């Protein structure tokens, strides 16, 4: 019988944690024991895995004893504190927060792009999962970089509210209902009404005028692609969509390539679905990509403002490929090749 693994999910009651449990089940991850962890607030709760009710345990000393792998999605401060302890207790951590992403000893992995970096898990027992907006972009840019070396990326994102968690989904739904019923619109999660609006502000502002989300896209892209010479600039925008982040991406390559070259390489690329037939109104949209694990790409065209420029439009499910699926894919390679 194939080897089975003891897996912990830390942050199991959250939007991402819940999807992680779903992905483990859908992908038939070889699990002999599943341990679900959350905060004191979840004491007494149970969650469903393969039709069984699994009790949620409160995170504490000993939570990772006997575990082989721990998938974390309980926020940066929990990861900072508990990931090293999980490794000490014997579990390799796949962490969804930004806490460890830029640590030079911690691999930052998108399986379609740099699976070989998983081997570095031995440094600290932690593998970092990138930010959702970075993941879907590098799935598409990786193969193009291999073809013609990308020198510069200019990206604008259109990010769904589910990236902020369950409470933001409820806020958008409540606001739409209030507007429809002619009642005053309230907002708590975002600094402004998000229904019928968009907000060019994700995570906190930094001294250089960029937001932290935008700087994550810059630094994480360079680390995953293993090339700090790639210039990246990003503008991240929250839009009133529930699932599916979209991105308008403009790239400059070292040598000129045609849109057809890009289509050819992306048609073969793992994790990519080409939807690029404007004559028949076929282009990626969040409603189509939601619930899927592939990154949809279309609107591929020559940038008319420069010879070595290409424009693309990408969409992926931010909770699946942007978070849970990517983490489970990392765990699959880790267990198959290293544990
Ligand atoms: P969420 O719905 O608010 O869920 C948070 C989860 O963390 C819950 O299970 C919560 O447990 C648990 N938690 C919080 N504080 C804890 C503590 N002190 N000890 C133990 N468990 C604790 O948030 P989410 O949307 O799932 O996101 C969770 C995290 O995933 C984010 O903070 C972020 O770091 C990461 N994330 C990454 C991406 C990405 O781009 N890759 C996208 C979204 C999120 P209770 O239910 O008991 O409170
Ligand atoms: O806003 C989005 O669309 C993605 C959000 C990601 C996120 C949310 C809270 C904390 C992160 C992340 O993964 O970068 C973090 C974090 O910094 O851990």
Image (spheres, rainbow, N blue to C red):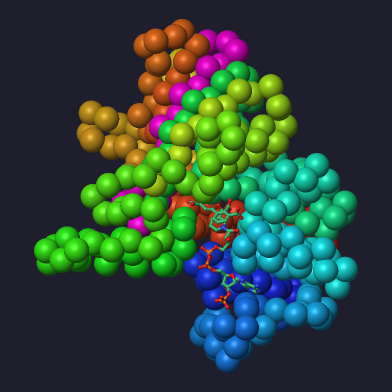
Question: Toward which corner of the image does residue 35 lie, by quadrant?
Answer: bottom right
Q: Is residue 246 visible?
A: no
Q: Where does the image place residue 264, in percent across and percent down from the top left?
A: 48, 26
Q: Where does the image place residue 241, in percent across and percent down from the top left?
A: 33, 52
Q: Residue at x 70, y 74 (%)?
A: 8
Q: Is residue 8 above or below residue 151?
A: below
- Check the picture and name the quadrant holding the C terminus: bottom right
Question: Toward which corner of the image does residue 46 lie, by quadrant?
Answer: bottom right
Q: Residue at x 70, y 47 (%)?
A: 101
The residue lying furthest to the front in this view is 207
Give the magenta-colored segment's residue range: 239-257
Q: Is residue 133 above or below residue 35?
A: above
Q: Is residue 283 above or below residue 255?
A: below
Q: Is residue 254 magenta?
A: yes
Left or right: residue 80 compared with residue 66: left
Q: Residue at x 11, y 63 (%)?
A: 182
Q: Is residue 105 magenta?
A: no
Q: Residue at x 66, y 85 (%)?
A: 57
- Check the picture and name the quadrant holding the N terminus: bottom right
Q: Where does the image place residue 292, in percent across and percent down from the top left?
A: 44, 55
Left or right: residue 331 compared with residue 216: right
The residue lying furthest to the top in this view is 307
């Amino acid at each position: 019988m194939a080897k089975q693994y003891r897996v912990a999910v830390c942050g199991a009651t959250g939007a991402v944690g819940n999807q992680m449990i779903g992905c483990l089940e859908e992908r038939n991850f070889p699990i002999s024991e599943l341990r679900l962890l959350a905060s004191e607030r979840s004491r007494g709760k149970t969650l469903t895995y393969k039709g069984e009710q699994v009790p949620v345990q409160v995170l504490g000393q000993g939570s990772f004893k006997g575990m082989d792998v721990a998938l974390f999605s309980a926020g940066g401060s929990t990861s900072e504190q508990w990931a090293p302890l999980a490794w000490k207790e014997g579990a390799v951590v796949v962490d969804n927060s930004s806490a460890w992403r830029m640590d030079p000893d911690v691999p930052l992995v998108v399986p379609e792009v740099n699976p070989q970096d998983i081997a570095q898990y031995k440094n600290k027992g932690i593998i970092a999962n990138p930010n959702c907006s970075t993941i879907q972009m590098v799935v598409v840019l990786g193969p193009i970089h291999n073809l013609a070396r990308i020198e510069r990326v200019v990206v604008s994102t259109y990010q769904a509210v589910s990236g902020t968690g369950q409470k933001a989904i409820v806020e958008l739904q409540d606001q739409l209902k209030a507007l429809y019923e002619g009642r005053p619109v309230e907002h708590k999660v975002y600094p402004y009404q998000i229904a019928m609006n968009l907000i060019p502000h994700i995570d906190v502002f930094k001294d250089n005028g960029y937001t932290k989300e935008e700087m994550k896209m810059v630094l994480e892209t360079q680390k995953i692609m293993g090339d700090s010479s790639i210039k990246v600039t990003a503008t991240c925008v929250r839009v009133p969509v529930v699932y599916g982040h979209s991105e308008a991406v403009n790239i400059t390559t070292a040598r000129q390539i045609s849109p057809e070259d890009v289509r050819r390489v992306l048609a073969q690329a793992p994790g990519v679905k080409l939807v690029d037939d404007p004559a028949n109104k076929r282009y990626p949209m969040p409603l189509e990509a939601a619930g899927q694990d592939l990154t949809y790409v279309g609107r591929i065209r020559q940038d008319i403002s420069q010879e070595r420029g290409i424009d693309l439009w990408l969409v992926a499910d931010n909770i699946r490929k942007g978070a849970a699926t990517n983490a489970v894919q990392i765990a699959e390679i880790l267990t198959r090749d290293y544990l």
